[in-house]
């Protein structure tokens, strides 16, 4: 959260909340800190966007606590005669189907939803975000659940090509297949679209490579890229490998992999496993591949002995 807030502060007013007291740090960054123990004060800041920068394992409980507070805030606005429009809620987890389901189930329908995964962190993004990958799925706008298979039509800053569907500014509703125009005669709809565009533009302006992708596809890809990287790092790390006087470049890369993955918490590793349904299959395939390689070695050794 601190990593993201520092960059966001360059683009607009930022309000942060946490269990720990970050008042001094927030003041130094030019942002406002509100204690997590006072969610009413946090929401009373009139936030357009709420970014949930929490761990995978704590996401469910965080949204369970936040959702009724947002509903209470919306009810208060309605009593005051205000426009009943909730904030855009954004997640930044390393798994995507899990937070998507939680947000859709728990948040008030007045909240728009954007599921994202910045494919970098404080280490890789310490010198800026230029060229780093930002994955996103527009999930819900103005109570319309969007069809992620048409995600490329939403954001014109992608490297996916300029098709006619991208240029016409339309999007498709999940289930009904209804085509909606971004300029439909609904104030909440137009403002919701604009708000998402402005939020996404922060990442684009910082130089990110914008990748529109469904949450399901993200998790399928991630199991065989991000998760298997963490898995191999943990397996090799458990062997106690260390630097030797005769290290090859390849082995140096292995030690670097171990260092990078072991530096992350085991909670993150467990979250990547538990909340991505594809991860168990990745483990099974790795176990099978290891067995196949061992069998090949044993067969070659057997053939060698028989030829003598």
Image (spheres, grey):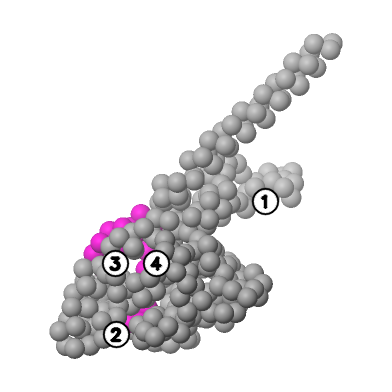
Residue 201 shows which numbered tag?
none
| Residue at the image position 45 percent from the left and 49 percent from the top | 276
Q: Residues within 10 Å of mark 3 (few under 14, many from 20)?
A: many
Is residue 89 in sight in this rendering?
Answer: no
* Residue occupied by mark 3: 107
Which quarter of the rendering shows the C terminus?
A: top right
| Mark toward the viewer: 3 or 4 | 4
| Residue at the image position 74 percent from the left and 46 percent from the top | 248
Q: CA distance from mark 2 to mark 1?
A: 48 Å
| Residue at the image position 35 percent from the left and 54 percent from the top | 57
Q: Magenta stretch: residue 54 in it? A: yes
| Mark toward the viewer: 2 or 3 | 3
| Mark toward the viewer: 2 or 4 | 4
Please report whichever mark, 1 or 4, sits nearer to the chain's N-terminal start.
4
Q: CA distance from mark 3 to mark 4?
A: 13 Å
Q: Are marks 3 and 1 in contact (CB under 8 Å)?
A: no
Using the rendered view, name the quadrant where residue 158 is placed: bottom right
- Stretch in magenta: 46-66
């Amino acid at each position: 959260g601190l990593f993201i807030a520092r960059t966001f502060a360059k683009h607009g007013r930022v309000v942060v909340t946490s269990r720990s007291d970050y008042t001094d740090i927030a003041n130094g960054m030019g942002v406002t800190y509100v204690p997590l123990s006072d969610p009413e004060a946090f929401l009373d800041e009139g936030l357009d966007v709420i970014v949930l920068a929490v761990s995978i394992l704590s996401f469910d409980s965080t949204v369970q606590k936040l959702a009724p507070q947002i509903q209470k805030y919306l009810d208060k606005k309605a009593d005051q005669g205000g426009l009943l429009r909730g904030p855009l809620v954004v997640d930044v987890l390393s798994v995507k189907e899990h937070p998507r389901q939680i947000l859709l189930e728990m948040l008030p329908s007045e909240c728009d939803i954007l599921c994202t995964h910045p494919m970098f962190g404080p280490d890789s993004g310490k010198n800026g975000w230029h060229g780093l990958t930002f994955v996103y799925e527009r999930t819900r706008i103005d109570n319309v659940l969007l069809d992620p298979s048409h995600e490329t039509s939403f954001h014109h800053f992608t490297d996916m090509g300029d098709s006619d569907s991208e240029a016409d500014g339309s999007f498709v509703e999940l289930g009904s297949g209804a085509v909606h125009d971004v300029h439909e005669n609904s104030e909440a709809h137009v403002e919701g679209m604009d708000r998402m565009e402005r939020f996404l533009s922060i990442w684009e302006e910082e130089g990110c490579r914008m990748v529109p992708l469904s949450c399901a596809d993200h998790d399928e890809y991630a199991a065989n890229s991000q998760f298997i990287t963490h898995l191999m790092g943990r397996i090799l790390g458990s062997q106690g490998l260390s630097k030797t006087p005769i290290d090859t470049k390849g082995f140096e890369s292995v030690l670097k992999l171990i260092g990078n993955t072991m530096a992350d918490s085991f909670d993150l590793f467990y979250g990547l496993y538990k909340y991505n349904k594809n991860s168990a299959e990745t483990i099974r395939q790795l176990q099978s591949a290891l067995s196949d390689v061992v069998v090949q070695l044993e067969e070659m050794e057997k053939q060698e002995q028989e030829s003598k």
